[in-house]
C-alpha cells in the first residue's frame, strides 16, 4: 500500500463525523456534567486490541463544508457536551472515529436527528471524502453510498456506507484501491453517538462494526441522558 494513499485518507478522516457548515452549527453552552458524560461515551484505547493508537485531538475547524443537497440548519439547537476520539492501526488504516454529542434537551436531540440522519448524509460523507482526497492530488470515484440495514441498538439507530475507489499516480504508475466508510448513528434521550470507520476493501468486518456500535450504545444508555 502506497504511503501517499494512506496519508491522504488519514487527512480526510480528520473531518468531523457529522460536519456541517459553520453558520448552521448548533450553539455551544458546554456544561461540565454533560461534557463528562460525552467523554464517558466515546471509545477508549482499552476497547481496541494491540496495534491501535489514539490520535491527538485537533482543534475544531471553522471552514464551511458544502454538501450539495445537504445543509441542515441546527443554529436553533444547543449542545451542552461533545467529544471525539479517533484511533488507527499502525500505518493509518483501518481508522475508527467515535463521537458523542449531548443536547440541552431531548427535543433538541430529536430535531438534530430528524434534520441530519437521512440518506443525504451518506452522500455528504462521500462528497467530503472525495473533496478532501482530490485536493491532495488523488482521484476518487464513489462507487456506492446510502443507508444499510443494522441492528436497532439504541432508540434511534441508523447506519450508512460509502464505497470509494482511490486512484493515485506515482512514478508513472497508477494504483487504484477500494475503501469503504461506515457510519453508525445512535441516539438515546438527549444524546447522540456513533463510530465512523474506514478500511480497505469492504471495510471493517460487520462483527467488529457491530461490536463498536454496541459498546457506544451501552455507554450512551448508561449516561442516562
Image (cartoon, rainbow, N blue to C red):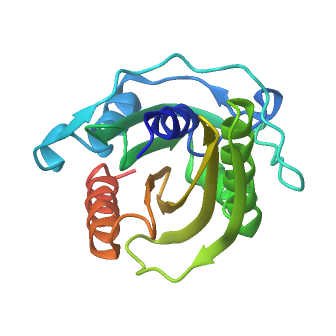
Indicate the position of residue 168 as horizontal and vertical percent values.
62, 43
Answer left or right for 224 relative to 136.
left
Q: Indicate the quadrant where residue 103 lies.
A: top right
Q: Would you place residue 80 above or below residue 202 in this image? A: above
Is 106 in front, or is 25?
Answer: 25
Q: Would you place residue 40 above or below residue 68 in this image? A: above
> What's the residue at 51%, 33% (across, down)?
4
Specify the farthest residue to the top.
Answer: 59
Answer left or right for 141 relative to 162.
right
Q: Would you place residue 148 above or below residue 179 in this image? A: below
Specify the farthest residue to the front.
Answer: 172
> What's the residue at 42%, 79% (across, down)?
152
Is 173 in front, or is 215?
Answer: 173
Residue 114 in view: no
Residue 55 in view: yes
Q: Would you place residue 7 above or below residue 107 in this image? A: above
Indicate the position of residue 65 as horizontal and vertical percent values.
78, 35
> What's the residue at 66%, 46% (across, down)?
129
Is 169 in front, or is 82?
Answer: 169
Indicate the position of residue 213 as horizontal and vertical percent values.
35, 63
> What's the residue at 25%, 54% (across, down)?
222
Label count reads: 0
Amino acid at each position: 500500500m502506497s504511503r501517499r494513499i494512506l496519508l491522504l485518507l488519514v487527512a480526510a478522516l480528520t473531518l468531523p463525523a457529522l460536519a456541517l457548515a459553520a453558520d448552521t452549527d448548533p450553539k455551544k453552552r458546554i456544561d461540565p456534567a454533560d461534557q463528562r458524560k460525552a467523554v464517558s461515551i466515546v471509545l477508549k484505547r482499552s476497547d481496541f486490541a494491540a496495534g491501535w493508537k489514539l490520535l491527538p485531538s485537533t482543534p475544531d475547524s471553522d471552514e464551511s463544508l458544502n454538501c450539495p443537497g445537504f445543509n441542515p440548519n441546527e443554529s436553533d439547537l444547543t449542545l451542552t457536551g461533545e467529544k471525539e476520539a479517533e484511533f488507527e492501526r499502525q500505518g493509518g488504516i483501518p481508522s475508527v472515529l467515535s463521537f458523542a454529542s449531548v443536547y440541552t434537551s431531548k427535543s433538541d436531540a430529536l430535531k438534530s436527528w430528524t434534520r441530519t440522519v437521512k440518506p443525504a448524509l451518506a452522500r455528504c460523507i462521500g462528497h467530503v471524502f472525495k473533496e478532501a482526497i482530490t485536493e491532495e492530488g488523488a482521484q476518487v470515484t464513489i462507487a456506492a453510498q446510502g443507508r444499510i440495514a443494522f441492528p436497532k441498538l439504541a432508540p434511534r439507530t441508523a447506519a450508512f456506507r460509502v464505497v470509494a475507489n482511490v486512484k493515485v499516480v506515482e512514478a508513472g504508475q497508477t494504483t487504484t484501491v477500494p475503501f469503504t466508510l461506515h457510519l453508525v448513528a445512535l441516539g438515546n434521550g438527549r444524546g447522540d453517538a456513533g463510530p465512523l470507520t474506514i478500511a480497505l476493501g469492504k471495510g471493517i468486518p460487520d462483527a467488529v462494526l457491530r461490536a463498536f456500535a454496541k459498546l457506544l450504545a451501552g455507554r450512551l444508555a448508561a449516561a442516562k441522558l
